[in-house]
Amino acid sequence: MAEQQQMKSVIMVMAVVALLIVSLVTLFVLTADDSQRPEPKTARFLLQSSSGPVTLEQFRGEVVILFFGYTHCPDVCPTTLSNVAAALDILSANELAHVQPLFITVDPARDTADYLAKYVGFFHPKMIGLSGTEDAIHKAAESFSVQYFKDDITDAGKDNYYMNHTSYLFLIDDRGEVVDMMSEHTTPEDIAKAVRQYIPR
């Protein structure tokens, strides 16, 4: 009987010690200086806009909404870009000043930088379209784990084809870290809500 009582006491002490350790670790995590966090690993690219070379790093300090697609896309791309444009219109002027939407083509053979500028301009004046070489596009897509391939089924002519591609919206915070991924079905209201969480205060 005494041994059982002693065993219970030992277990109680161990439980209290374990609880104390967990509490201290939690307190350390919650009070840790955010500036001491290591710089996040981020995707990188060097692509071309109608105004010249563009890298992801140049948008540090801003929230980036990034989408891969192509201008001949019949449905998903224009719908998604329309939703992004509507989300941007929900934001205040001050909020919008800290947000940069980017559209990267997966079809550089047809989507030149100048053509992309006109295309994205129909959706929102702040949107930037990016193109580049096949290799540069591949590297950019790979860094976001985006898949794409040409559909060889054509109706007529070599330029009449579709591109199958990953259709996520990537939300990148002001430090260059991917913090959210949204589907093409995400509403403008939900896109705006997600963006607001990461706009620098």
Image: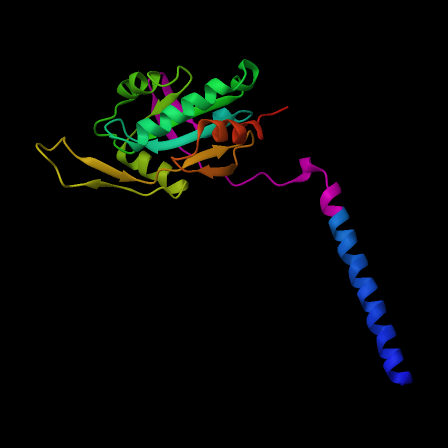
Name the quadrant containing residue 106: top left
In this rendering, position of residue 165 left or right of residue 201? left
Magenta stretch containing residue 48, yes or no? Answer: yes
Decide whether residue 78 is among the magenta residues. no
The structure residue drawn at horizontal position 41% and vertical position 38%, both measured from the top left corner, is 183
In the figure, 164 relative to 197: above or below?
below
**Which residue appears at 49% of the width and 27% of the height?**
189
Residue 44 point in image, percent of width and height: 44, 35
**Quadrant of res 7:** bottom right
Residue 131, visible in the rendered structure = no
Q: Which residues are magenta?
A: 28-55
Give coordinates of residue 137: x percent, y percent.
Answer: 32, 34
Tally the marks.
0
Q: Quadrant of the C terminus?
A: top right
Residue 176, can we see it? yes
Rendering quarter of residue 80: top left
Q: Residue furthest left?
A: 156
Residue at the (26%, 23%) spot, across then down: 112
The image position of residue 186, as x and y in percent, is: 43, 34
Describe the colour scheme in one phrase: rainbow
Which image quarter is the N terminus in? bottom right
Residue at x 23% of width, y 28% of height: 72
User: In this rendering, is residue 24 above or below 190?
Assistant: below
Task: Please indicate whether residue 72 sits to the left or right of residue 141 in the image.
Answer: left
The residue lying furthest to the right in this view is 2
Q: Nearer the viewer, residue 14 or 45?
A: 14
Q: Position of residue 60 (x, y in %)?
A: 53, 27
